[in-house]
Amino acid sequence: MEWEYEPDKTPKRKHSWEKNAAGFISIGTTVIGKCPKGISIDTAKELLNSGIPWSPRRWEKSHPQRIYAIHHGVLYRAMPTIPGKSYHGFPEHPRSFSELPKALREKIFEHAKQLGCLEQVRKWVNQ
C-alpha cells in the first residue's frame, strides 16, 4: 500500500523551521523535532513509502504504528495521522533510538548502509 504524507497544519506542533538542517527545540519539558526547510511533500512521501514499517507485537491494525526513514543521514519517525491512509514525520530524537527494539535498530542501520549513509546515521543517533 502507498501511504500519503500529511503535513502538520497546527502551528503549535509544526515540525518545520527556517534552518537547512534537522534539529530540535525545547518548549518547557517537551522536545520537538524540526525538519530542515526545503523538504517537499513529494520527498516526504517518497521517504515514507521507502521507509521501515514497524508495529509492536500486539498491534492488530493493518497499518504500521510507525514508519522510520532516513534522509541525509538523519533518522525520521512517521506516525499515523489518518490511520490506514496517511502519516506525518519528524526527526527522531537521538535519545529515543536506544529505546527502540534491537531488531528495529539493526534494520535501521542496515537501511542506512544500503543508502550509503551508515556513519552519518550512527553519528545522528549517538549525539
Image: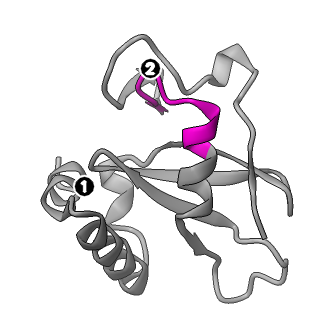
- N-terminal of the pair, mark 1 or mark 2, is 2
Q: Nearer the viewer, residue 33 or 37?
A: 37
Count of residue discs: 2
Amino acid type indicated by mark 2:
Lys
The residue that mark 2 highlights is 37
Image-quadrant location for residue 102: bottom left
Residue at left offset 35%, top offset 62%: 97
Query: Which type of secondary structure does the marked residue at label 1 adopt?
Result: helix
Quick check: is 35 in the magenta stretch? Answer: yes
* Crowd tier of the residue under label 1, counting other residues whose Cα lies within 10 Å: few below 14, some 14–19, many 20 or above: some
Marks 1/2: CA distance?
Answer: 21 Å
Quick check: is 58 in the magenta stretch? Answer: no
- Magenta stretch? 33-44
Residue at left offset 39%, top offset 68%: 99
Q: Position of residue 125 (x, y in %)?
A: 24, 55
Is 60 above or below relative to 75? below
The residue that mark 1 highlights is 125
Q: Is residue 45 left or right of residue 77?
A: right
Q: Nearer the viewer, residue 95 or 7?
A: 7
Q: Is residue 9 left or right of residue 48?
A: right
Is 94 above or below relative to 51? above
Q: Nearer the viewer, residue 76 or 101?
A: 76
Residue at left offset 30%, top offset 44%: 72
Q: Is residue 51 visible?
A: yes
Q: Disc 1 vs disc 2: Cβ atoms closer than 8 Å?
A: no
Image-quadrant location for residue 118: bottom left
Q: Quadrant of the N terminus?
A: bottom right
Query: Which type of secondary structure does the marked residue at label 2 adopt?
Result: loop
Q: Position of residue 86 (x, y in %)?
A: 79, 51
Amino acid type indicated by mark 1:
Val
Is 100 above or below relative to 124? below
